[in-house]
Amino acid sequence: MRPHPITLTAIAGIGETDYSSNSGRSELHLAAQASLAAIRDAGLTPADIDGLVTFTYDSSNELELQRALGVPALNWTGRTPFGGNGAMATVQMAAAAVASGVANAVLIYRAFNERSGARFGAPETSRIMGGGLKNDFHYDFGFDTAAKMYAMTYQPYARRYGVTSEDLGRYVVTARDYAATNPRATYYQRPLTLEEHQASRWIVEPFIRRWDCCLETDGGSALVVTSLDRARDLKQPVVRVHGAAQRHGLNSRTAYDVYRSDDDRAADERSINEQLHRQSGFRPHEVDAAMIYDAFSPAVFFGLENRGFCGPGEAKAFIAEGHIGRGGSMPVNTHGGLVGEAYIHGINSIIEGVRQIRGQAANQVAGVERVLVTGGSALVIGTP
């Protein structure tokens, strides 16, 4: 049986800026800094790059970044819709370009000043950046921030399965425990107790507290995707792309996607799992660690259940029993996640997955061969 074309690609380089609340640099500067770090990490030069992929939300123009880096020519460019829900789709796009022969080395980048500049968590910024939905009726009814969107999605789940604020807090405490020993993390040496989580102010009562929300970060992250054969000759240990998937049903929306039926959502999740299995030959939960998109803590509960780590309504027990923490059966967000390290729309979570495969992570998990990285899209990476 011939391997799926995507599985013949690899992530060869990773790069990051520092993560802060006031970078003092333009977003293009941050994109170039992270990108150059990723290119050098791979043992390549800008002249080796012939493709660029980013998000529709990114403010840095591809051609401006090309000039900033000194890339002679581009044969492929692309942007994935959304913010973090499309993070893993960037790898799918890059891998597809490489696998098809359209490009040889594709640079993925994401950079912003989300704390010192435009803060997406603010209603007016959310309205402007809402994926073309700024005229949607829900804004006029005060449904105008990402925190409210997650709370709305989470509400029926929490009531159905009796999930409480304390249950969410147990995830956040675990993520902050990892962040506290990750020197790159915003909350390095700053763990959190469940009592402190419960004492934090409500953002959307009675579901989301202050510490359930991701960081607002100034910074940039970047990746280089190339062919598996070429990666074997480069600088770093090979990190193979075993599978990359996205799915958007007929009634999907780019943001505030809370109006669909449970059946529609379940169909999307099944499709993503089936795509990953068809490409890689194993199920999404058959990995050694997982980086699950955690813009808000409820997303981790959905991610654990949707990808098959536990059954419906079982995520709260899975977390409470210590499975995702240090020494657990399925370590999750070992960098501290987007609530503890930084929020770069999930690209920094892919970078953590790469580090785990390479054996270079601050909180290294022993014997890691495969890592799942997931949001609205999903990715499995691993050893060759």
Image: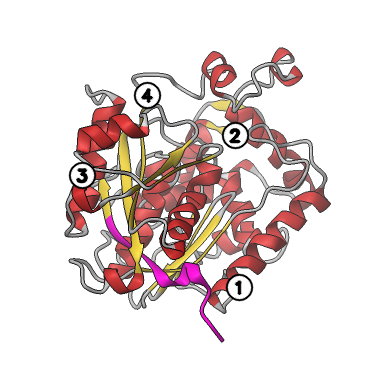
Q: Position of residue 311 (x, y in %)?
A: 70, 66
Q: Is residue 63 in sight in this rendering?
A: yes
* Mark 4: secondary structure: loop
Q: Is residue 245 left or right of residue 373?
A: right
Front residue of 355 and 197: 355
The residue labelled by disc 4 is: 115
* Mark 2: secondary structure: strand
Q: Nearer the viewer, mark 2 or mark 4?
A: 4
Q: Residue at x 52, y 51 (%)?
A: 89
Q: Position of residue 71 (x, y in %)?
A: 23, 42
Instruction: Report how far apart the C-alphas of labels 1 and 2 lie in the structure.
Output: 34 Å
Seen in the picture, residue 121 relative to 53 is either above or below; the reply is above
Number of numbered callouts drawn: 4
The residue labelled by disc 3 is: 36
Q: Position of residue 117 (x, y in %)?
A: 37, 19
Q: Residue at x 19, y 39 (%)?
A: 70
User: Is 334 one of the magenta-colored residues?
Assistant: no
Q: Nearer the viewer, mark 4 or mark 1?
A: 1
Is disc 4 surrounded by few (<14), some (14 to 19) or many (20+) residues within 10 Å? some
Q: Nearer the viewer, mark 3 or mark 1?
A: 3
Q: Is residue 65 left or right of residue 139?
A: left
> Of the residues shown, which amino acid type is indicated by label 4?
Arg
**What residue range appears in magenta?**
1-13
Is disc 1 surrounded by few (<14), some (14 to 19) or many (20+) residues within 10 Å? some
The residue labelled by disc 1 is: 277
The residue labelled by disc 2 is: 208
